[in-house]
Image (tube, rainbow, N blue to C red):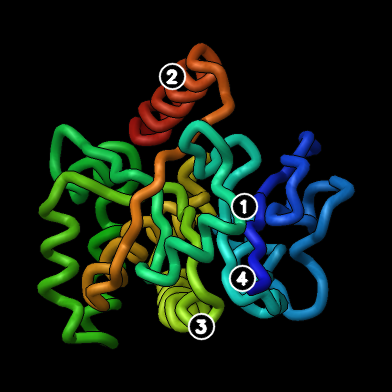
Amino acid sequence: MKNTIYIATHKFFIPPINHLYKPIVAGADFHRVPFLKDNTEDNISYKNPYYSELTALYWIWKHSRADHVGLVHYHRYFYDKHLLSAEEVDAILKQNDFIVPTRETFSCSVYKQYASVHYENDLYYTCKVIEFYHADYKPYIDEVLDGNTLYTGNMFVTSKELLDDYLSFLFPLLSLLETQIPYLSYSSYNKRVFGFLAERIFNIYLLKNNYALYEYPVRDTFSERKQSLTRERILKEIRNEKRV
């Protein structure tokens, strides 16, 4: 089996010394970094300020020839005392459809959590667009958004076949949502709306299709202090934005 886990990044970093992992620049139209770029041939790199790591995921969908493919982040990896290995990928995906991060648990519903830091109408439009084009998804939308757990980060590993199926579902929805959401007027954080919405869509897709999931711990290599400062900055930006 040929396995590749791509590491989405917008800056230079020291990648793992492991042939399984391949850095890819998400938004290569905007970032000059000496890694594989997401702006060659069929691509949506120019949408990176609004799609985040999804521009790299789009490139992977259109160009990767690996049997098993995945996406992580330059500071966030599947890690359980060691990095997820190619041998583990093969073994896990013999019995499961997707490797996903351990669920994140919120103190409120997924819907309310989204509305607290983003724009509620955007999630509402997302639900309506999915229901209109995929009516059989309705009960699964409700179950995910009424629940309080979520697989976050747009991180996963799966077969190329299932990746193709998921992204054939995801990207047409996001293109439709671009016509409904006034994202160009948002702050830099909330401009990344389509990446945030994709996290919720991914969970709905997984539940609807009843895929076998293997939850794998995630390690964030940012220091706790840096994470805390980042959260504080983002929350301040959101508060200021919603006052306008």
Please say if 137 is above or below 50.
below
Label pair 2/4, CB-CB below 8 angstroms: no
**Mark nearer the N terminus (1 vs 2):** 1
Q: Residue at x 40, y 47 (%)?
A: 216
Task: Tell me the distance, in whole angstroms, between the alpha carbons under discs 4 and 3.
Answer: 14 Å
- At mark 2, the secondary structure is helix
Q: Is residue 175 visible?
A: no
Q: Which residue is mark 1?
A: 49
Task: Tell me the distance, in whole angstroms, between the alpha carbons under discs 4 and 1.
Answer: 14 Å
Q: Residue at x 51, y 49 (%)?
A: 191
Question: Residue 113: image x %, image y %?
Answer: 23, 41
Q: Residues within 10 Å of mark 2 (few under 14, many from 20)?
A: few
- At mark 3, the secondary structure is helix
**Mark nearer the N terminus (3 vs 1):** 1
**Tag 2: amino acid:** Glu
**Tag 1: amino acid:** Pro
Q: Residue at x 34, y 57 (%)?
A: 214
Q: Which residue is mark 2?
A: 232
Mark 3 or mark 2: which is in front?
Answer: 3
Q: Which residue is mark 4?
A: 58
Task: Tell me the distance, in whole angstroms, between the alpha carbons under discs 3 and 2.
Answer: 40 Å
**Mark nearer the N terminus (2 vs 4):** 4
- At mark 1, the secondary structure is helix
Label pair 3/2, CB-CB below 8 angstroms: no
Which label number is shown at residue 161?
Answer: 3
Q: Quadrant of the C terminus?
A: top left
**Tag 4: amino acid:** Tyr
Please say if 132 is above or below 222.
below
